[in-house]
Image (tube, rainbow, N blue to C red):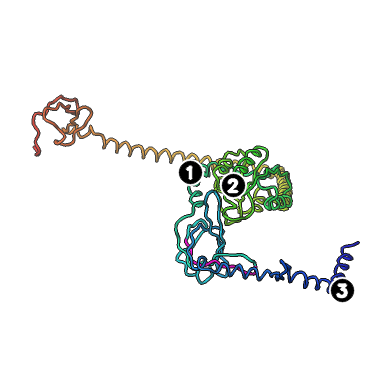
Amino acid sequence: MTNQNRNRQISDYWQDDDHKIRVGSYSENNLSTKENNGETEKVKKVSEISAIIKKLLDNEQLCSVWMEGEITNLRAHASGHLYYSLIEIRNNRTYTINCVMWRTAASELPFKPVNGDLVRVFGSVDVYEPHGKYQFVSRLMQTSGTGDKYLLILKWKEELSKEGLFSEIRKKPLPRFPAKIGLVTSAGGAARRDIENVISRRFPVEIILSHASVQGDKAHLEIASALHAIDGMTDVIIIGRGGGSFEDLFAFNHPDVVRAITRCKTPVVSAVGHEIDYTLSDFAADVRAPTPSAAAELVVPDMEELRKELGYFRNLIEKSLLSGLENERERLESIKLGFHPGRLERRLNFENEKTDEMTTRLKRGIESSLRNRRIFLEALNSRLSSSNPKNPMKNGFCLIESGGKIYSSVNDLSLGESVIINFNDGYADAKIEAVYNEKKL
């Protein structure tokens, strides 16, 4: 039986009047009431249960109260409303409550909240009846500091940075044409499917999966182990997962994962979450991709683009070869014409005249250069002679020194000091017996 015939029979079955009566009778007699110890109890509707829950939560303890927690999963809607969650970690357990702040209250906030902020919010617990979900409707928000998990990430970042694990110097380049690609992610995750689809479309190569849980208390251990297992087996490794909450991505901030990335001999591409998500793995990896799909595009070239590029260079080479052959043909034709006796004689005479002219120019240039250098050397010699300290000594001046030190002032001399007085034609030893601060001449 075909699907079309089966669907037609089902449709006809539900349109049958007798069946409608039987179903209506069953619903009316069996779903609207229930026997309980001889008493008839009405079965409640989903909306009625939601209304009861809403009424139960509408009490003084849950109305107009202050609540403190760490912001996560913050999302600003285009309408101006803020949607977020507050978390608290106690006894190794994470407690979460969904929150909302409507546009009017959000517009009056004195600061811009971000994930990781520790805040106090004032409001009431409410139930969204159509979905049966409760949430905290916040009217006020005050900052209380930074959340525990965010502080832990900052602490890890500082420690790992001091170890040099985020240094650009240690980054490895990606291969242009990898033959094998390693993938560290969840075997059943969307990231794996996205990466495999992109690679198969762009540049089909072998993909080796090293499975690891990408969220949870032990995820960081599995990720580090998966990286170690696959290192050296491929040309490049992609580590990552799809989008998620702050807690979902937390494992990729763990020092075990960061150190495992930096220990890899194979280049590593980090692709965690969406473009706005950043983890410490992004800083440690050789390349950071905004999404898993973008990581796949980074590690393999586009086959179509390569074909276009090869076609372009093939045409370029063909044109270059044809142009070169044409130039050589023209050159050979020119050479053939040049072998005519009359042309050769004229060419020879022209070259002889050109050689004579160049010889004359060269000779003049050399003579001019030598003359200029002789004048320069004479001027330099004259300047050196005038700067010779012995020239003033010929006119009766003396040079006084002691121990290699030359004295230029009477204030430099000390009583009883032995000095040497240099003359133009010799020197004399002397001893300072008196010093006067006045000119004799």
Closer to viewer: mark 1 or mark 3: 3
The reply to whether the C-beta atoms of the residues labelled 3 and 2 are less than 8 Å apart is no
Which quadrant holds residue 33?
A: bottom right
Residue at 57% x, 53% y is 247
Number of callouts in the render?
3
In the image, the segment drawn in magenta is: 120-130
Q: Is residue 162 above or below residue 79?
A: above
Which amino acid does the dot numbered 1 rest on? Glu
Q: Is residue 129 magenta?
A: yes
Q: Which residue is mark 1?
A: 159
Distance between mark 2 and mark 1 Cα atoms: 21 Å
In this orientation, does residue 272 appear? yes
Closer to viewer: mark 2 or mark 1: 2
The mark that comes first in sequence, 3 or 2, is 3
| Closer to us: 30 or 298 | 30
Left or right of residue 407: residue 294: right
| Closer to us: 433 or 129 | 129
Left or right of residue 267: residue 435: left
Residue at 71% x, 66% y is 37
Q: Which quadrant holds the N terminus?
A: bottom right
Which amino acid does the dot numbered 2 rest on? Asp
Residue at 87% x, 63% y is 3
Label 1, residues with CA under 10 Å away: few <14, some 14-19, many ≥20: few
Q: In the structure shown, which secondary structural element does the residue marked by tag 1 occupy?
A: helix
Q: Which residue is mark 2?
A: 217
Where residue 253 appears, x then y in whole percent?
Answer: 55, 48
Where residue 250 appears, x then y in whole percent?
Answer: 57, 50
Q: In the structure shown, which secondary structural element does the residue marked by tag 3 occupy?
A: helix
Where residue 54 appears, x then y in whole percent?
Answer: 59, 69
